[in-house]
Amino acid sequence: MNDARRYILVLNCGSSSIKFALFDAASDPLPRRPAWNGKVQGIGGAQPDFGETGVAPRPVELAPAHPYRDALNLILRRMRAWLGGGRLAAVAHRVVHGGSKYAEPVRIDSAILRDLRSYIPLAPLHQPFALEAIEILLAEQPELLQIACFDTAFHHTIPQVERILPLPYDAWERGLRRYGFHGLSYEYLSIALRERHGAAAEGRVIAAHLGSGASLCAMRGLRSQATTMGFSALDGLMMGTRTGALDPGAVLYLMEIERLSLEEVGRILYHESGLKGVSGISADPRDLLAREADAPRARLALDLYVRRVVREIGALTAVLGGLDMLVFTAGIGEHSVELRRRICAGLAWLGVQLDETANAAQAAVLSASGSAVRVAIEPTNEEWIAARHALDLGA
């Protein structure tokens, strides 16, 4: 269905899903909307499904022995059918962790892949899946250009006083430090906010990436100055199933007194906490908002979620020395009218005034005319950022 144009495939590989997006690399400028996209989800589960542009998700069968490889091959088969006579110029991968070494995207070869494996202990629940996809493609198509785009890279501008952890100094030398994540999302905002808001975006900005994973980034001059996620993607805000910042003594208690294993504690912190754990109902705030009137724990979970966001915005405002703009992005940030309203109500002390009509309409600017802080929504576009990096590196 397509001519011999060049395309860039972007892969975002998680533990149970692979999101994909195909961009027309021959167009100038690079289109911000993909020509084709979708995802395979439920990988490793009983009912995986595959959805793509214009087609509702449908069940698929994946080999039980290697479901992830099967899911990737399914995407590649569908992509080749979609491309017709088009040519795949490159694959760009979202790689969660680049450590302290990688501040820019890189072309991947076997040596780089070995290097990236060394960061698996820093992100054991995220890093291996992108590397598995890279390894499969390297083996099957060694001539294909592959690019690693790191979620940690945007935060390399954070000063050392924000990155260092209050552990013995040799921990810093071993690589234990605040890295920060969601960097591809914040990198997109650093472009889109300047385009939409001009000079106002160059001031003291806090971006709230609120999705199933969540973090805040304090920016000045559209460069990262501080962020809530730290050494791992567990830190900072309360999330769908993750704790966010937690007294380490609670972890020691679970292991020493309740005798839970490392694996059991890891499962609790990553998969059984957050909105899901406190509510006992769901990790999705839409479900909790629908139940909060008759389910006290649903209301408690939402109250805690909002409280933690408000508290961390206050802390980052102190780091910035004030706040000029608050930006909501990602699934919850872009779509939850009610949670934006509650968060902004908790920031009234900062002079935040929400325009309720604009908030209900999902307008680009949500703040009332008299607000001391501009409040905005900016849909994120991590895939476009990754495709753009691939283009810059020769796709």
Image (tube, rainbow, N blue to C red):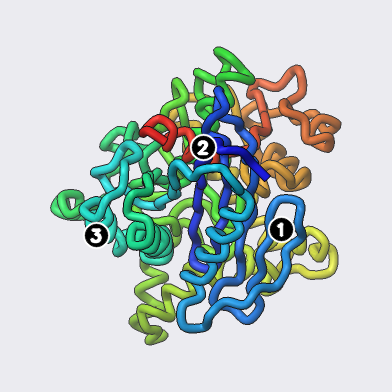
The residue wearing badge 3 is 118
Q: Residues within 10 Å of mark 3 (few under 14, many from 20)?
A: few
> Could you tell me which residue is drawn at 31 percent across and 59 percent down?
122
Q: Nearer the viewer, mark 3 or mark 2?
A: 2
The answer to whether residue 161 of the structure is visible from this angle is yes
- Across and down, in percent, residue 329 comes to 62, 40
**Which quarter of the rendering shows the C terminus?**
top left
Query: Which is more N-terminal, label 3 or label 1?
Result: 3
Above or below — where is 341 with respect to 124? above
The residue wearing badge 1 is 285
Q: Residues within 10 Å of mark 1 (few under 14, many from 20)?
A: many
Q: Secondary structure at mark 3?
A: loop
> Could you tell me which residue is drawn at 47 percent across and 75 percent down?
267
Above or below — where is 158 with respect to 210? above
Amino acid under disc 2: Arg
Q: Label 3, label 2: how many angstroms apart (C-alpha)?
A: 33 Å
Marking on residue 6: 2
- Across and down, in percent, residue 11 comes to 50, 52
| Viewer-closest of 118 and 233 | 118
**Which quarter of the rendering shows the N terminus?**
top right
Amino acid under disc 1: Pro
> Could you tell me which residue is drawn at 60 percent across and 63 percent down?
40
